Image: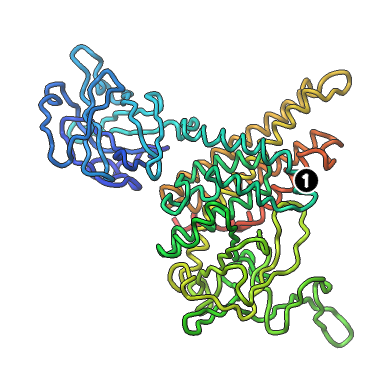
């Protein structure tokens, strides 16, 4: 991460850092958090001046912040200071003893800070080794002081021990429960309820939902790691789990306490499944133009709409006639005056909770609200099950509202807040679906590597062919680049940085394009075998193709990225 700008140094706090530590003029200060709750920081900076051993020994015992203990992970002494539970603490670092190299002998010199135990969201322990935490002292030029840049190098070079454990559990579950059934779920179009509930027992039903309602309380980065690993077992099923998680998060984040405790616990255990209802037949990328209406009548909203039929002109002598674009389809017929409220809904008909974006006010995004509709509500019905190229382990149907009365108590957030909730959810959804693409691409690379080793042509294994070696190298390079972009965006989203939307859009655009290309190349390198349904790479390719379309098409991602750039 780039160093803070000059204007961020000195007395100003770096954007994104929580809390301001008291200044100690004879110390280096490390910004951290109390043991109760310590988020993972990517980079921090504060101003400090060199300390002497005498100044450190003479440091008075403060009353606020109060001493919280000593860190013994380093042979040097470090005094840990804290204000109160839940507030930042500092580690006061003494200067080296006499005769030892001075940390401020030159304009830049590395400083090793102690290995302190941090905690992730909601108190989950995160082990940090001394090699993962370091600081760099740099002359600030003002009063002989120094700016100390703290960086957790695990964020850029790999995963911490806790994240490796999450990854291992997810990989093992994918290999044991998902991969052996992936082809059958695809061919028979089975919705694997029992397997998903087993995943929920591992905490995967509400990965970034708060713990007080049954969630795991993990970070966006943790979530990306888990979804990538699960997607190696079945990309389609993992993608549905990611949508389910997004719905649970939206209720957890924007719902009232009553709504959180009513809806989230059964979602986190996957006793109940959730679907996200935004897309309509006439509003895909232009989500703000949705037409599903919710009119308030007393203590209920009545969801309904008006029939929409796509037409094209047909030329004939003297007149133009509108004809349907598509022939009549079998399945439930929608009566005149209504229309399928939302289309292309993953889990439609099987899910128990539908997080619906509907219009409670005037046109535009400010007229949209978010309402939870439960399965079995009178007036709620479903269209036929769509036949898809991929994603066959999850059903896709239109969700139809015909005078569907829903209690006002089921509205999430305030009236007119629905579009904001939808977009906030999609920012995380883009990271999630891109992570699913990563899993598909990673599995395809492994399968291709193994195929090249055993498949022989012209008397030699394909792995000895330099052209194929180069192709494999390109695939891996693009995979790693995609992974880094996704994880960078996940950290930005977790920290609620201003550039999070643009970074999520970039990650989704780049990763889904590149990962589909990797899967497609893997099929090519398998030759005719890759085109058989018995070969897994063709399913990874089919399941990952739709990731370039949903959660905001990649064309819309380009719009969001360019808009962010042009508004600077």
Residue occupying the point 62% across, 38% down: 173
Q: Nearer the viewer, residue 167 or 388?
A: 167
Residue 4 in the image, given as x and y percentages of width and height: 34, 40
Q: Position of residue 282 (x, y in %)?
A: 67, 72
Residue drawn 64% across the image and 44% down it: 437
- Residue at the top extreme, as displayed: 99
Between residue 438 and residue 151, name the one nearer to us.
438
Question: Residue 322, relative to residue 257: is it above or below?
Answer: below
Instruction: Residue 35 in the image: state x and y as whole percent.
Output: 31, 38
Q: Residue furthest bottom?
A: 318
Q: Quadrant of the C terminus?
A: bottom left
- Find numbered disc 1 in the image and state the secondary structure of the residue it sits on: helix
How many marks are shown on the rendered structure? 1
Crowdedness near tag 1: few (<14), some (14–19) or many (≥20) residues, C-alpha within 10 Å: few
Identify which residue is drawn at 85% across, 23% down: 456
Taking 7 as reference, is 130 above or below it?
Answer: above
Quarter that holds the N terminus: top left
**Residue 99 locus on image (x, y percent):** 20, 11
In this rendered view, identify the residue nearer to me: 67 or 526.
67
Q: Horizontally, is 55 left or right of 249 in the view?
A: left
- Which residue is labeled 1 in the image? 184
Q: Quadrant of residue 73?
A: top left
The quadrant in which residue 117 appears is top left
User: Taking the image as drawn, is residue 558 in sight?
Assistant: no
């Amino acid at each position: 991460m780039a160093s803070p700008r000059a204007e961020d140094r000195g007395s100003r706090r770096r954007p994104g850092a929580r809390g301001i530590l008291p200044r100690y003029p004879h110390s280096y200060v490390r910004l951290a958090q109390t043991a109760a709750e310590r988020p993972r920081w990517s980079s921090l900076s504060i101003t400090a001046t060199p300390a002497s051993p005498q100044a450190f020994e003479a440091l008075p015992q403060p009353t606020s912040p109060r001493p919280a203990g000593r860190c013994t992970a380093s042979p040097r002494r470090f005094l840990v200071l804290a204000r109160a539970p839940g507030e930042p603490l500092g580690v006061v670092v003494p200067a080296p003893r006499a005769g030892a190299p001075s940390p401020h002998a030159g304009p830049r010199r590395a400083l090793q800070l102690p290995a302190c135990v941090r905690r992730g969201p909601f108190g989950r322990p995160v082990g940090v080794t001394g090699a993962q935490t370091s600081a760099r002292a740099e002359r600030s030029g003002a009063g002989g002081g120094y700016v100390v840049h703290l960086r957790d190098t695990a964020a850029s070079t790999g995963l911490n021990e806790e994240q490796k454990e999450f990854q291992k559990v997810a990989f093992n579950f994918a290999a044991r429960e998902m991969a052996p059934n992936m082809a059958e779920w695809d061919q028979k179009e089975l919705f694997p309820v029992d397997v998903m509930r087993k995943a929920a027992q591992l905490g995967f039903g509400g990965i970034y939902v708060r713990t007080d309602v049954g969630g795991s309380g993990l970070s966006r980065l943790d979530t990306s790691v888990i979804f990538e690993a699960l997607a190696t077992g079945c990309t389609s099923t993992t993608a549905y789990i990611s949508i389910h998680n997004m719905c649970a998060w939206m209720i957890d984040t924007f719902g009232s306490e009553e709504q959180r405790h009513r809806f989230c616990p059964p979602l986190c255990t996957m006793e109940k499944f959730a679907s996200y209802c935004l897309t309509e037949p006439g509003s895909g990328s232009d989500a703000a133009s949705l037409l599903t209406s919710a009119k308030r009548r007393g203590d209920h909203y009545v969801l309904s709409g008006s029939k929409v039929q796509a037409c094209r002109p047909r030329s004939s002598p003297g007149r133009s006639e509108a004809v349907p674009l598509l022939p009549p389809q079998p399945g439930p017929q929608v009566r005149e005056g209504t229309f399928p409220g939302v289309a292309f809904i993953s889990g439609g008909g099987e899910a128990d909770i539908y997080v619906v974006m509907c219009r409670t006010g005037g046109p535009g995004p400010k007229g949209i609200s978010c309402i939870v509709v439960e399965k079995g509500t009178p007036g709620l019905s479903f269209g036929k099950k769509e036949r898809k190229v991929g994603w066959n382990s999850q059903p896709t149907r239109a969700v139809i509202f015909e005078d569907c009365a829903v209690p006002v108590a089921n509205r999430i957030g305030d009236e007119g807040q629905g579009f904001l909730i939808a977009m906030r959810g999609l920012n995380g959804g883009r990271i999630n679906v891109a992570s699913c693409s990563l899993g598909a691409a990673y599995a395809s690379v492994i399968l291709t590597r193994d195929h090249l080793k055993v498949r022989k042509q012209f008397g030699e294994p394909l792995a000895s062919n330099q052209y194929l070696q180069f192709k494999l190298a390109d695939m891996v390079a693009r995979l790693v680049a995609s992974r880094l972009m996704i994880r960078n965006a996940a950290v930005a989203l977790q920290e609620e940085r201003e550039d999070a939307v643009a970074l999520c859009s970039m990650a989704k655009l780049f990763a889904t394009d590149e990962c589909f290309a990797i899967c497609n190349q893997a099929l090519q390198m398998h030759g005719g075998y890759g085109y058989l349904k018995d070969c897994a790479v063709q399913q990874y390719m089919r399941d990952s193709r739709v990731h370039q379309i949903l959660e905001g098409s990649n064309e819309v991602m380009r719009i969001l990225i360019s808009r962010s750039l042009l508004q600077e």
